[in-house]
Amino acid sequence: MTDTESPSTQRIAIVTGGARGIGAATAKRLAADGLAVAVIDLVESSTSDTVEAITSAGGRAIGVGADVSVTADVQAAVARIADELGAPTVLVNNAGVLRDNLVFKMTDDDWDTVVNVHLRGSFLMSREVQKHQVEAGWGRIVSMSSTSALGNRGQANYSAVKAGLQGLTKTLAIELGRYGVTANAIAPGFIATDMTRATAERMQVSFEDFLEGAAKEIPVGRAGQPEDIANAVSFFVSEASSFVSGQVLYVAGGPKA
């Protein structure tokens, strides 16, 4: 919190899937930008490292356990955040899971789990938070898409939901713009996280070799870091982006069609 901000004027952000990786980096960046942050993850205790990093630096943060695909969990989480931190007007839809497989091997549960967490979860969170945004006459919604939205072998479920998030984002921008709310999406490319480490393990490749191989295919010559995505979120949440809405920003170290 800066010297000019008090708990009564400070903007409140929610970051889902904020326990690690892109979510944790985003929560920390928004806190550094002066926002209070509610870190949501499936298990509340898993948010402790992120929350501690923020509070030890002088920021305000709480951890909240919730399954974003469950309506009652979402409603309870947002109500608690409004009570403990203040009415949330910034939402970062980042929670996600992987259940990769080729279509002929993909189970119903593989499909449903990914759809429920990424797409249903982002819808439920957006629907709940927009009430506070509309009342405030200001808001920001940033949802995590992916370059996989353009199609990716073995990710029919993930690709579908990431493309769906782009459609959801554009519709939110149209519906909520009159209330001072912008909605944008970020589509990360290859980012070095626990999720990509797990992918390397499934492929029986060392993480270092996995990163090196990915970097060779990226025009800027390196893998992305969670902070690269957090920087983009920071822009979309800022006042500087007030005329930018309904957009999809590919943060991938090179162009994507």
Image: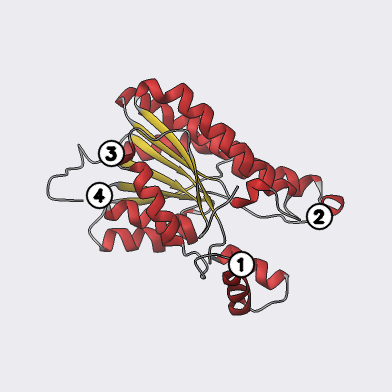
In primary-sequence order, the first of circles 2 and 4 is 4
Q: What amino acid is found at the position of numbered circle 1 in the picture? A: Glu
The amino acid pointed to by label 3 is: Glu
Residue 27 in view (yes/no): yes
Identified by mark 2, the residue type is Leu
Q: Nearer the viewer, mark 4 or mark 3?
A: 3
Q: CA distance from mark 1 to mark 2?
A: 23 Å
Q: Closer to the N terminus: mark 3 or mark 1?
A: 1
In the figure, is residue 67 to the left or right of 238? Answer: right
Residue pointed to by mark 2: 102
- Image x and y of residue 46, in percent: 48, 60
Mark 1–mark 2 CB contact (< 8 Å): no
Q: Is residue 26 at all visible to an observer of this figure? A: no
Q: Nearer the viewer, residue 114 or 172?
A: 172
Q: In the displayed structure, would residue 90 be above or below residue 22?
A: above
Q: Is residue 209 left or right of residue 130?
A: right
SS for dot 3: helix
User: Which numbered dot is residue 239?
Assistant: 3
Marks 3, 2: nearer the viewer: 3
Q: CA distance from mark 2 to mark 4?
A: 43 Å
Asked which secondary structure carries label 4, the reply is loop
* Few, some or many residues within 10 Å of mark 4 (<14, 14–19, 20+): many
Judging by the rendered image, the residue that carries numbered circle 4 is 34
Does 78 sit left or right of 151 as displayed? left
Q: At 28% across and 39% down in the image, what residue appears?
A: 239
| Circle 3 or circle 1, nearest the eye | 1
In the rendered structure, are the residues bearing label 3 and label 1 in contact, judged by CB atoms less than 8 Å apart? no
